[in-house]
Image (cartoon, helix red, strand yellow):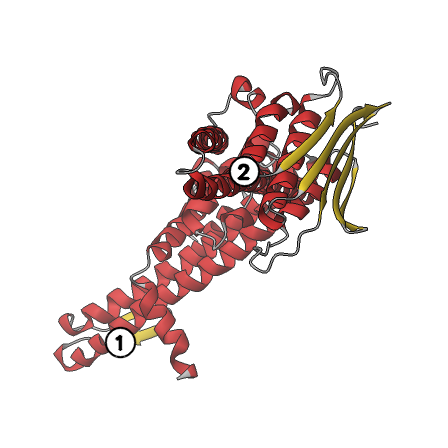
Amino acid sequence: MRALRPLIKIVSAVAQGRTYTRGLHLLLGAAVGPVCVLVYPGISPSLPRTLLSAALVPVPFLLLLGMLPGVRRAEGIQARYLLVPGDEDEIGLAAAKGFAERGRTGVWLVARTWWGLLVASLLAQLLSVTGTVATAPAVEQSRRILGLDIPGGHAHIWYLAFVPLLLLLGVAIVVYAGELQLALAKRLLGPSAADLLAAAERRADDLLARNRFAGELHDSLGHALTATVLQAGAARELIDVDRDFAVRALCAIEEAGRRALEDLERTLGHLKGEEDDAARTARPTLADVGPLLEASRAAGVTVNCRTAASFDGVPGVVTREAYRILQESLTNVMKHAPGAAVDVVLEIREDQLELSVVNTLVKTAGRTSGTGKGLRSMRERTALLGGRATVGPDSGRWTVSASLPLRLGS
């Protein structure tokens, strides 16, 4: 079975579009030499001399052409579409930036011309032999091709059995020549080290952006859903006993749902590239702490809060991230320590914003277990701003403490 794999590969290549596009790419390169020879020095009666001229005459022109920065981009586009690499990024699309890349482009043009000329010559000879063999039964006299005498006549109709094999040989030449051409393109037209580094940085930025969006949705929707579940449960239990409390709980559910929808729409708008400066600045900040605390109190959490008089001097990114850290901390209290008292402190000390959320530990058999994503999110938010955070139990209490610098980059 292993011995038949090359044959199976060649037969299956007949139905693949890339076989024909790669053949076209080879023939386009082969056409450069003959066109140059037509201009100078002209077609020679000697076929070997003509082929040699077609290979050598274009070289100075191709090397000079490779010095043009845009030629590398044009060749990269053509190679991507016609050679069909498995990964398009293996062939660069950027214009040549330095002499080294321009030199590689010139070498590529020469190599492409030579390789295409060789493959085209082989295919031309093979097609000539195939045509001679295919028509031999219809021609009585013998014909000589490539130093071989091929007799004709009806008695040699069995020659036709070789025609499919010769055609498959032609397909094999195109397939393997195209693969070699592709490997050469990856080598000479592939992205430079600087391009690879830039691509890696773009992927890292995209990953960070996705993680940030995931963190935004986790904190916003997680808080809203947790508060909604607790408030809905309390309202259901007390609707016949304390109707006013049930109404307040339903209003809190409505407000939490509205804020969650706003966050969801804003995040989706950013993913679609539709978020503008107004939408970006509309993200909740420490100025919105009041409604956040009220929603937590409505969910049954006793919150005592001490905050600075004003957060006007706090950079926007710091006040937004501090809000999310506080929101996630209160969500964790509602999930893991329902009914516990919480002390929240928000202060500005010198060039730092100090945030502290402390609650008593509650042992409840039915308490939901977390995945730890919220804690990681708080640490990541703090670290990205150059601050520090500590999260964990301390003397029977759960403490979240974060220190965020007000002078970013200092």
How far from the left and from the top, in percent, is residue 115? 50, 54
Q: Judge from the rendering whether residue 396 lies leftward or rightward of residue 7; answer left or right.
A: right
**Residue under the image location 71 percent in, 29 percent down:** 305
Mark whose residue sits in front, 2 or 1: 2
Q: Real-space Cα distance between discs 2 and 1?
A: 85 Å
Q: Is residue 205 visible?
A: no
**Residue under the image location 19 percent in, 81 percent down:** 158
Whether 256 is drawn above or below 397: the answer is above
**Residue under the image location 46 percent in, 46 percent down:** 80
- Badge number at residue 162: 1
Whether 358 is drawn above or below 145: the answer is above
Task: Compare marks 2 and 1 and give the one earlier in the sequence.
Answer: 1
Q: Judge from the rendering whether residue 242 lies leftward or rightward of residue 379; answer left or right.
A: left
* Residue assigned mark 2: 299
Of residue 68 and residue 262, the one placed in the foreground of this image is 262
Image quadrant where residue 201 sits: top right
How far from the left and from the top, in percent, is residue 340? 65, 44
Kind of element beneath mark 2: loop
**Residue under the image location 36 percent in, 57 percent down:** 19
